[in-house]
Amino acid sequence: MPVLPADLERALLILGLGGARTIPFVWLIPAFGGPNLPARVRLALGFALSALCFPLVAGRLPSGGAVLWSLLLLREVGVGLVMGFVAACMFRAVEAAGWLTDVLRGANLAEVIAPEQGSRSSPLGELLLLLAVVIFLEMGGAGILATALARSYQAVPLGAASPGPTSLHAAAFLVIAASAKLIEAAIGLAAPALVALLLADMALGALGRAVPQIPVYFVGMPAKALLGVGALLAGLATLDSALTVGFRGFLGLLERAAQLGR
């Protein structure tokens, strides 16, 4: 069996170790393709980011046995998962707003199995998620994510000691804060459509009480479906600015995630 040159073996080791942090980061963020992108392409993107971070990893390789390397790999995967989760919450909040609007406008039957994903899909959720990715890329979000990833190597270098209780507490706090902000942002983004649909339910209820002969249920189904879409389209002008502000808030959390070890 041929033996790799020492320099090539070291380079592959650095790329693999860097990929332990960058691949989870890429895997969780829809802006890098999400589930629609084949796994091989996402792995290639992860290793490409690892190659960009090559100088940050190359000078900090620790020396040790297999146990140390195994623990180091686990820590790198953990850092990548925390940062990827915080960054993904920016997009999942927008998708959740679309899901919530679809549920309240009675479009549950539209949640069909997406052929390319093999999972349930919400029409407005998918639409808002794509819009969020476009706005995020337009505001230079990919560069911000790459910068945050590079700073994470300064905050949590490879040669640093194992994370202590303080670092684990900070990571847990960031995950909880990002989850809470996800719920807050989803309800805030869906609020105009939710208010419109609530008023429509009240109007239909009053109409049904005043004129019992009218089949309110069958009249209300298409009316609420169109009203939900109309309220969403009417709010697209403000949705752009709302998403930009929301992304900045999540990016602030991501900056804190990049400093877990400090």
Image (tube, rainbow, N blue to C red):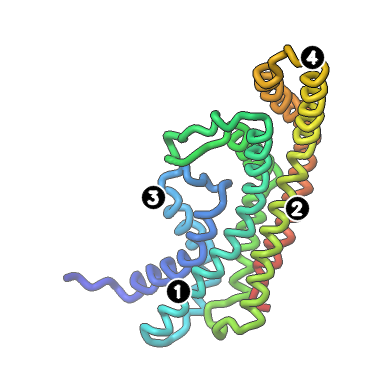
> Counting residues from the N terminus, which is met first, the one under dot 3 or under dot 2?
3
> How far apart are labels 4 and 2 at the CA level?
50 Å
Question: Which residue is identified by label 4?
Answer: 211
> How far apart are labels 2 and 1 at the CA level?
30 Å
Question: Which residue is identified by label 2?
Answer: 248
Mark 1 residue element: helix
Q: Residue furthest top?
A: 213
The reply to whether the C-beta atoms of the residues labelled 4 and 3 are less than 8 Å apart is no
Question: Which residue is identified by label 1?
Answer: 73
Nearest to the observer: residue 192 or residue 71: 192
> Counting residues from the N terminus, which is met first, the one under dot 4 or under dot 3?
3
> How far apart are labels 1 and 3 at the CA level?
20 Å
The picture places residue 224, in percent across and down from the top left corner, at 70, 24
Q: Amino acid at mark 1?
A: Leu
Query: For residue 40, which numbered disc appears in the image?
Result: 3
Q: Amino acid at mark 2?
A: Arg
The picture places residue 169, in percent across and down from the top left corner, at 66, 77
The picture places residue 198, in percent across and down from the top left corner, at 78, 32
